[in-house]
Each structure stands twice: as structure tokens, then as C-alpha cells.
Image (tube, rainbow, N blue to C red):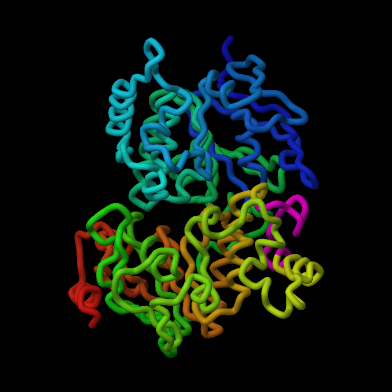
Amino acid sequence: MQSENIIEMLHITKEFPGIVANDDITLQLRRGEIHALLGENGAGKSTLMSVLFGLYQPEKGEIRKNGERVQINNPNDATALGIGMVHQHFKLVDVFTVLDNIILGAETTRMGFLQKKEARAKVQALSERYGLRVDLDAKVEDITVGMQQRVEILKMLYRDNEILIFDEPTAVLTPQEIDELMATMKEFASEGKSILFISHKLNEIMAVADRVTVLRKGRYIGTVNTADTDKQALSNMMVGRPVQLEVSKTPAKPGGVVLSVKDFTVPRKGHKADAVRGVSLEVRAGEIVCIAGIDGNGQTEFIHGLTGLEKSSGGSVTLCGKDISHASIRQRGESLSHIPEDRHKHGLVLDFTLEQNMVLETYKEPRFAHYGFVDQGAVRAYAEKLIGQYDVRSGQGPLTVARSMSGGNQQKAIIAREVDRNKPLIVAVQPTRGLDVGAIEYIHSQLVAERDAGKAVLLVSLELDEVMSLSDRILVMYEGEIVGELMPQETTVQELGLYMAGARRSGAAAAKGGDGA
């Protein structure tokens, strides 16, 4: 008799230097079900899925497909078994086009010649069928992170996989894109595909998953039906303690203007139209101002222009009364804290150790350097303090190479470093992306504490719950302009969504964004 489970991972143990990432874990995936894998950052979720996809070999345990034992030595073996994976940190070639990335390794050839026309037709049909539209001729390096996510999903669909692994698939998506992805996943399941879905987001798990398996610190805690549980119970299973799911804060008491941006314009790479057009805004001491918007509406370019990662073509930026419009990246970096959107490209040097990453911007300061030499003891003590304070989990503590850490722990390391620098302005872009509920609770409390200590916080978030609960003021960006200024206590998620989609525009905000008034 055929097993009801299409995949069984039995007693899997996977070890790395200094850490047991998976400790005797058993996971069973039924045919046509959406099975969520839930756990804190560093709980071993991605490691377990990497074992299933052939990226890692376990020390103990076995994998069965349709009741028969299989050996998965590499991703090609996994693909041959119909297993596909969308990784949390995308596996794309930046200088290739979208189409080339999708067909890479699964090219259709005839008489030794690449048949791109057939491949293009198949990819276009898939993208239209599942609402995953993307420019097939654009280079990956020129498209948004949300679009790169679509490319990864199309890669998997192109290979006709029947077992789909999604590792934090919504971490980079907008609310609308998340809704679309959830609907797409349900459609996949209704077609008989089986889905393993790693997520920290309890709302999504409750909305889309049939069952949830919870891991904690590398160990199996239990599997439950979503119909028989709730968010609070799942968060308790995941963290091992009650978690506050709402942001706790008092009303803001804004002080003087810390950041003033006037008529700010940033060009869009390779396009005539500007990515950011005449944006004006202010952020005061003691307030959290959030820029909300659908991904790709100029938020990334605005922050890059503000922090010096890209050149602006017009307007001015004043920080604490000083014009920094023409300051270098280093000069700007010394004046503000920046939690970047892309932690790999702009947040960490992946092949440096954790302790080296903790002092990337401060190693020249007298507390870490004497006569041009870095004091390694001082650096280590500082890194150990931040690791403990922010619960950054890694196999070898300060000596862990950043690349080997889980995405959530990489994020916690960046936040620890930037908040501790004690600058008057914190620019936080997607600060809780990829973090579990316990870590989100802590980061939110830290940002509120910084606000209450008189810092100005400029938040960019695609998470509507975060926007509504953490912000003191919300500025909505649409097609490179500020189209609305809203107070979270006076608006609704639905109204905010209308502004984000460009269906509504407030006159005051439009005027402010256009003429610097």
C-alpha cells in the first residue's frame, strides 16, 4: 500500500562546528498538503530543508519518498526526485537575465543549440497562470528583491517539481504579493503538489497551512493541525515562553527636527524616469516615522540616496542642522545608523567573523584602536556583550563566520551594531525581516526605547502590521512620491492599502512632495 506521506525525514541529525543544528528530527509531509515549519532564528529549519534539498548530508537519519528510502547527495538528486526549493537568500546570478536564471541547469537544447524560444513561452505561460509577472529580459541585479523572489518561484515551477520548499518566502514581499503567493500556494496544493513552508509569520501559517511542525534550538517540539491551535499557542511552542504580540508604547513626544529632506530626487538606473521625485519630509527627535509602500515604488532608491549608496540628482538633506547633501558615504555613516534592506550586500562582510562585522564602522575609534593597531581583546569583549544582549546565536560565538549564520541571526547582529552606535538618526529598512516573534518583540521594544531616549527613527517597512503598530506617523510612497501622511490611530489597514496602490492621494502630502512646502 502506498504511504500517505510523500516525504518522510526520519531521525535527522545534522551537526556543524560547535552546534547541533538538527537533533533527531522527524518530519512527515503528506500528499497535497501545505506543511509549515515554525521556529526561532537558528532553530534549524533552513538546515533541515537544506538536508532535504541535498545541500547538506546528515550525520544520522534517513529520507523516504513514497515510503522508499532515497539518497539525496546534491540538489540535482533532489530535482530528479521532483523536489524544488526557494531559498531565503536567493541563488541567482546577478549579471544574467531573468530568463537565463530560470532555465539555468535545465536548458532545452536541440542538436546542441539552446532553444530559448520554447523556454520563454513556457516561463511566460507559468508567470501568467500564477500571477508571477516579471520582465524576462531584465538583469537580476536591476530588479527589486520582490521580483527576485518571483524568479526563484518560477525556477522551481519551470522544473515541474511536485514537492515545493519555500524558505521564508514572504520575507521580501508586499502585503498584496503575500496574498497572491498564499493563493498560489493553495492552488499548487489543490493540483496535488506538496508544500513545505518555512515561516516566522503566524498570520500566514494560520491562513495557509494544514499542519505545523515546531522546532526549538534544533529539536522537534511537536506537530499540530492549524485548525486545532492559535497564534499565541504556536508562539509559546516556538519560543518556550509567552510572547507579547502587540507593540507596547506610549504616545510620542516629538522634539526638534533631526532629519530634513527637501525636494529630493534620485534617478533610476537605466531609465529616464526618476525613481524618487521631489520628496520632502521631516523626522523629529522622539518619533518613529514610517515610509510605507508597495515594493519598487522608490523606497529603496530614497534610502540609498539618503545614506549615500546612490547619488541624488536634486534637493537637499539636512541632519541635525548640517547639510549632508554632498557628504561621502563614510561621512554620512558616521552621522547616522543604517539597518539596510539587503543584509548581505550592504549589512555584512559575509566572510568576516561576527566580531569583525560588529566593529565595521567603529574599529578606528580609540576604544578599539591604539597607534593604528586594532585591540582584538576590546573588539571581542564588545562583540560578546552585543551577542549576549541581542541573543545572536552562532556556533562559535564572536569567531563565527557571518556567512554560516542563519538569516535571522545575521539580522540581529546588524541591528545590535547599528543601535549601539548611539547616533541621532536610525534609518531602519525592513528591520524585522526574517525574524521570529520573540526577536521581533525585542527589536520593536529597542526601537521604541531609542525613540523614547530622544532618537529620530526613520522606518521603511512592507509589513502593514508593523507599520500600523510601530509608527507615530506614516508617509506613503507611490511611484517615487509621498502621496499621503497618515496617523496610525486615525487610519485603517484598508485605507493605507488604497494610498499604497495609488488609488488615493492626500492634497497636503502631494503638495509637500512636489514643491517642498
Q: Nearer the viewer, residue 383 or 462?
A: 383
Q: Up-down: is 124 above or below 2?
A: below
**Magenta-tinted stretch:** 387-402
**In the picture provided, is 303 more to the left or to the right than 331?**
left
Q: Quadrant of residue 9?
A: top right
The quadrant of the image that shows the C terminus is: bottom left
Residue at the outermost front position: 371
Q: Up-down: is 361 above or below 116?
A: below
Q: Residue at x 62, y 47 (%)?
A: 39
**In the picture provided, is 80 more to the left or to the right than 222?**
left
Q: Is residue 53 visible?
A: yes
**In the picture provided, is 462 more to the left or to the right than 39?**
left
Number of disc labels: 0
Residue 208, percent across and down? 44, 40
Q: Residue at x 61, y 75 (%)?
A: 421
Instruction: Say if the magenta span includes residue 399.
Output: yes
Residue 48, percent across and down? 65, 36
Q: Is residue 237 visible?
A: no
**In the picture provided, is 407 more to the left or to the right than 208?**
right
Q: Nearer the viewer, residue 274 or 91?
A: 274
Q: Quadrant of residue 461?
A: bottom left
Q: Nearer the viewer, residue 306 or 113?
A: 113
Instruction: Say if the magenta span includes residue 382.
Output: no
Q: Residue at x 50, y 26 (%)?
A: 163
Q: Residue at x 66, y 65 (%)?
A: 358
The quadrant of the image that shows the N terminus is: top right
Residue 466, percent across and down? 45, 63
Residue 387, percent across and down? 71, 63
